[in-house]
Amino acid sequence: MEENGVIEPLPDEEFGREVTSDYDPSDTETTFGSLTSSVTGHVWEYGRRYHAFRYGRYPLPNDDEEYKRESLRHAMLKELLRGKLYLAPIGDNPQKIIDLGTGFGEWAMEMGELFTGAKVTGVDLSPIQPLWVPSNVEFIVDDIEDEWVHDQDYDFVHFRFVNTVLKNNELVLHNILQNLRPGGWVEIQDIYPRISSDDDTLPEDYPPAKFYSLLQGVLKDQYGFDLKVLESLPDHLQRLGYVNVQRKVFHMPLGEWPKDRHLRMLGGCFQEVFLDFVAAMAARPLVEAGFDKADIEELVVGVKNAVGNRRIHAYVPIHFVWAQKPPA
């Protein structure tokens, strides 16, 4: 069943590559738990900080600026869901929860506070989570595209803004299916990078749409990511053996153009999140793809000016997809 709901400039010069820890990353296979938060390698490039594990293959930074963006995005999604952290019907007493690509760990920590009897694990390539966390929450530094330890007892597996930056979604979703208990749930929350308008106010040369189009090619060629994977995700889940596959799509306003106060507030939040995302992509992936700095700066300025135009009623779909492992 499918439901629908509506609701910085670049540095002047490139910075040298500096690793801020003596950790030597390797490409040897790992499993969850094989690495811990002692893996503290970071790399400074183009004026931003990135993780060093697996040679920094994730394109977004992990510095304070990125923390502000992720924190605002987390608050935005909670507001979108009227305070909820998920949509899957996981019940009132899940015992084992894992957050894949946990980032700075806010979702995992709030789930630990919500379900005090559950063990909540967050997994990420970067050791950027807080040291002081609820007693039932732990964080692991590892690569979620590796093979899992086959515990087969997770009640709930959660992704947020992760699937569009995976090289092999089907492999990861297969591993999840093997590690869910019978009747357990997986939920994916992500942005589908397509900008639309319901009232024909979107110009053909709208810079944010141009940015998304450009970025899809860059991330596909440079990293092997498919930003459009959400379109076929329900089919992937069904083919892998999941049941009760559902999707809900929210139309997130890009900018403060809605008349409705709640939607206007969400649009303002998303405007800031989007602009910070554009700046992060401009800082490294577009430069490494060979784009001229002057062209990148022109695109960034154009995007900033466009999203501030309230006469353009643009929105971006945010997909929530959840599915269940067949009950025993």
Image (tube, rainbow, N blue to C red):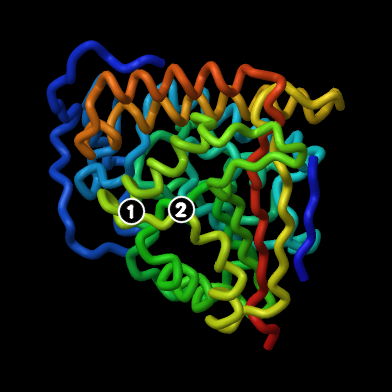
**Does dot 1 land on a helix, a strand or a loop?**
helix
The amino acid at mark 2 is: Leu
Q: Is residue 75 left or right of residue 71?
A: right
Q: What's the residue at 85%, 24% (across, down)? A: 259
Q: Residue furthest top?
A: 12
Q: Which mark is residue 109?
A: none
Establish if 179 lies above or below 253: below
Q: Position of residue 40 (x, y in %)?
A: 27, 36
Residue 115 shows up from this direction = no
Q: Position of residue 183 (x, y in %)?
A: 69, 77
Q: Are marks 1 and 2 in contact (CB under 8 Å)?
A: yes
Q: Is residue 188 left or right of residue 2?
A: left
Mark nearer the N terminus (1 vs 2): 1
- Residue position for label 1: 220
Q: Which mark is residue 227?
A: 2
Q: Is residue 47 left or right of residue 3?
A: left
Query: Which of 27 and 283 lies nearest the eye of the viewer?
Result: 283
> Which image quadrant is residue 327 in?
bottom right
The amino acid at mark 1 is: Lys
For the N terminus, the image quarter is: bottom right
Q: What's the residue at 68%, 88% (across, down)? A: 328
